[in-house]
Amino acid sequence: MKDKPRVGVFKFSSCDGCQATFFDLPSLWGYLDFKYWLLGKSKNELEVLDIAFVEGSVSTQEEAEFIREIREKARLLVTIGACATSGGIQALRNFGRLEELSSVYPEPEFIKVLERSTPISEHVKVDYEIYGCPINPHVLENFVKAFLHDRRPEIPSYPLCMECKLRGNICVMDAYRIPCLGPVVRAGCGALCPSVGRGCYGCFGPCKGANVESLVSWFEQMGMSRKDVIKLFENENAYSEAFRKVLEGKVG
Ligand code: SF4
Ligand code: SF4
């Protein structure tokens, strides 16, 4: 095994839930040299890194500048979670007008944000994306182990339905007519919701080749209203390329 990789864990607009996943993996700590991780240690310096793990979306000018600085220092840049890969909940504001939305604050002139909150890949080159809200610790662990052993990391890109069927679940959509985003959502959570009889909410974002048009037409055949279909896609991955077209009225 090679020397301990120099690692940075960075937070942008987010809730900290994804970077907190490192706390779930103490067995990895001895194999990584954390150079920068505000949540995990008190002495932090931005220096040359082997891997920068980035959580959160870019919402302010300072964040837009900082992510470019990180990119210059990092050999690999890996986004972790829905905020970093798709924009997260805060990107829902991209579907409205900033002036109108900020009018809910008593002093809106104090709000200094960019017009849109955007995924990291809109700003810099991203080498790998780990999906989820929050990410699954096993996927993160596998990623780090693959890096340590010079293997290609395996990040699921197939639909959740595969994971769901492997668990032997009864399909909630087929059997009970409960709407489920599983056919267009990336596996990785272990099919948590369908395993307890609920439809998938889409935390892991669109799978590779997601056929959103087909699923929306299936929902319509089930008798769902346009408003309810949009609500289903109004999640932390709403601003992903595949899902945003539903909210923009380009599908259905
Ligand atoms: S993806 Fe979800 S868990 Fe991760 S930082 Fe964003 S809101 Fe938090
Ligand atoms: S319950 Fe959802 S995820 Fe599971 S097979 Fe049916 S559509 Fe797919």
Image (tube, grey):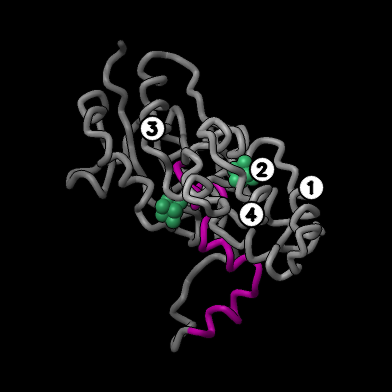
Disc 4 crowd, CA 10 A, few/some/many (<14, 14-19, 20+): few
| Residue 76 horizontal/vertical position (percent) | 46, 29
Q: CA distance from mark 1 to mark 3?
A: 31 Å
The mark nearer the N terminus, 1 or 4, is 4
Q: Residues within 10 Å of mark 1 (few under 14, many from 20)?
A: some
Q: Is mark 2 within 8 Å of ligand 2?
A: yes
Q: CA distance from mark 2 to mark 3?
A: 22 Å
The amino acid type found where label 2 is placed reads Pro
Q: Secondary structure at mark 1?
A: helix
- Tell me where residue 36 sits by quadrant: top left
- Magenta stretch contains residue 101: yes
Residue lying at the far top of the rendered structure: 1
Pair 1/3: label in front = 1
Q: Nearer the viewer, mark 2 or mark 4?
A: 4
Is the CB–ligand 1 distance for label 3 below 8 Å?
Answer: no
Provide the residue designation for mark 3.
Answer: 138
Q: Is residue 45 above or below residue 65?
A: above
Q: Amino acid at mark 1?
A: Ser
Circle 2 SS class: helix
Q: Residues within 10 Å of mark 3 (few under 14, many from 20)?
A: some
Q: Which mark is residue 183?
A: 2
Disc 3, SS: helix
Given contact means CB atoms under 8 Å apart, are the residues at marks 1 and 2 in contact?
A: yes
> Where are the magenta residues, as a range?
79-104
Which residue corresponds to mark 1?
Answer: 214
Report the front residue among 86 and 222: 222
- Residue annotated with mark 4: 176
